[in-house]
Amino acid sequence: MNEISRKEFLKMTAMSGAAILLSSLESFAKESKSSKLRIGVIGCGSVSNRYIPHLQSSSLIEIVSLCDIKYERALAQNREYKVNAATYPNIDEMLKGVPFDMMVTLTDMQQHGHLNKKALMAEKHVWSEKPIATTYAEGKALLELAKSKNLRLWGAPAVVNSPQFSFMAKCIQEGKLGRVASAHGQYGHTGPDWSSFFYEKDGGSMPDLGVYNIATLTGLLGPALSVMAMTSIVNPERMIYEKGLVQVEEEDNAHILMDHGKGIISHVMCGFNYFDPHGHEAHGQQLHSIQIFGDKGNLRLIGYDWETSGVYLDDSYDHPATLYHQETGGYVWQEGATKVAESIINKTEPKINVEHALHVLEIMEAARKSSATGTKVNLQSEFKYPLDA
C-alpha cells in the first residue's frame, strides 16, 4: 500500500469510527431510560475480582447481571461485591434476562469470539478481555457485525491509557530520541497452574502475555507491516491443580520480530518458562519491560507495561538517565471496560480502539504462521496512528 493510500485509509478509519460512535450513542439514548450504562459481566473467575470493583467505582455504570457456566461463581461474586445483580448459568439465559447495554467478557480466551458474537447479535456493545477472538478473520467479522448494528466493540489490553505510555509516545513524536531504529519488549513467568486453557489449542503465551508488549510497541511505533517469528513448546506437560497433568498444545515460548516501516524493527519475547521472582505480580517490579532506541536517546519502561513504575529517558552523554512519571495518574490495567462504558455515556471517543486490538490479533496469528513455515508474513490490518492524533 503506498503512502497516500495509507493516509487516506487512516483518515477514513477515523471518520468511520466517529460516525459509528455517534450512531451507537443515538441508539443508546433512544433505548435506555437510565443515565447509567447497564453492564452484564460474563465470566466470574479471578479476573472479575479486579473488574467488578472498578466498574462499581463509576457513577455512570451499573452492573445488572453476572454470568458464569460455574454458576456458583456468579452467585459468590454477587455476594462478595454486593452487586445486587441478576445471575445466570449461561449466556443464552443472560441475554434473555435482565436488559443491559454492554457485555464485559472475562471468560477463558478460547470462548471470547463466539460469546462476543452472541452479544452483538443481541444488540449489546462489547468489551472483551484479550484476545477479542481466536483468529483475525473472526475478529474482523465481529467488527463488521458491530458496524452493521451500530454497536461498539473493544478489546483489551488498555496499556495505551497509562501516563507512561503517553510520555513515551510524546518523546517519540517530538523527536527526543532522534531517528527511532529499534525496540524490545519482554514479559514472562513460569506459567499458571490454576487452569489448563492457557495451554490448550488457541491458548498460549502470546495471547496471554505477549499481547501486552505487542499492543504497547505497535501503539508507540505504529502498525507493523510484516512479522517473522519463532515459537516453541519448552515444557510439553503441565500440572494443573484441578486436572492433574495436561498436554501443552500451544507455544509456551515465543520470539516475534515486527517491521514497522521506515527502518524500525521491534522484538517481543514472551513465555511460560521465564523465572521472575515477581511472577505475574507487578508490585515492586523494577526491571524494564519495554525499550525504545533512537540515535539521540532511548526510553526504558520500568515494571510491566500493564502496571508501570516509571520511564527512564537517557539522552545525554554527560548526565545519568532521568526517571519520569512514577505516578499512575489513576491508571490501572482493569480500567478498559469502565473507560469505554463511560465514553458511551459521555459521548467521547476513548484512546483504546478495536482496530488496534485486531491488528495485535493478526500479529499473533502471523507469528504462528511464520514459525510454522519459516517465512516472513505480511499483514493486512492497520489502525489510527499516532493514537493521540
Image (tube, rainbow, N blue to C red):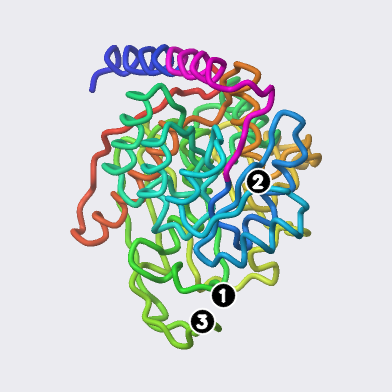
Q: Is residue 28 magenta?
A: yes
Q: Position of residue 133 (x, y in %)?
A: 37, 48
The residue sitting at the right extreme is 327
- The quarter in which the N terminus is drawn is top left
Q: Earlier in the sequence, mark 3 or mark 1?
A: 1
Rendered residue at 20%/53% (across/down): 375
Q: Vertical placement of 125 versus 254: above or below?
A: above
Q: Nearer the viewer, residue 178 or 154?
A: 154
Quick one: label 2 or label 1, which is nearer the N terminus?
Answer: 1
| Nearer to us: label 2 or label 3 | 3
Secondary structure at numbered mark 2: helix
Residue 369, quarter of picture: bottom left
Q: Looking at the image, which is closer to me, 140 or 341? A: 341
CA distance for labels 2 and 3: 26 Å
Q: Amino acid at mark 1?
A: Trp
Magenta stretch: helix, strand or loop mostly = helix
- Amino acid carrying label 3: it is Ile
Q: Is residue 161 magenta?
A: no
Q: How would you rate the neighbour count of disc 2 (Cα within 10 Å): few for under 14, some for 14-19, many for 20 or more?
A: some
Q: Secondary structure at mark 1?
A: loop
x and y, in percent, of residue 50 in the image: 69, 52
Upstream in sequence: badge 2 or badge 3: 3
Residue at image mark 3: 240
Query: What x and y, as percent, mark residue 284?
Result: 78, 59
Residue located 51% across and 81% down the image: 240
Tell me whether the residue at label 3 lies in contact with that at label 1, contact meaning CB atoms closer than 8 angstroms.
yes
Q: Which residue is mark 1?
A: 194
Q: Which residues are magenta?
A: 18-40
Q: Amino acid at mark 2?
A: Trp
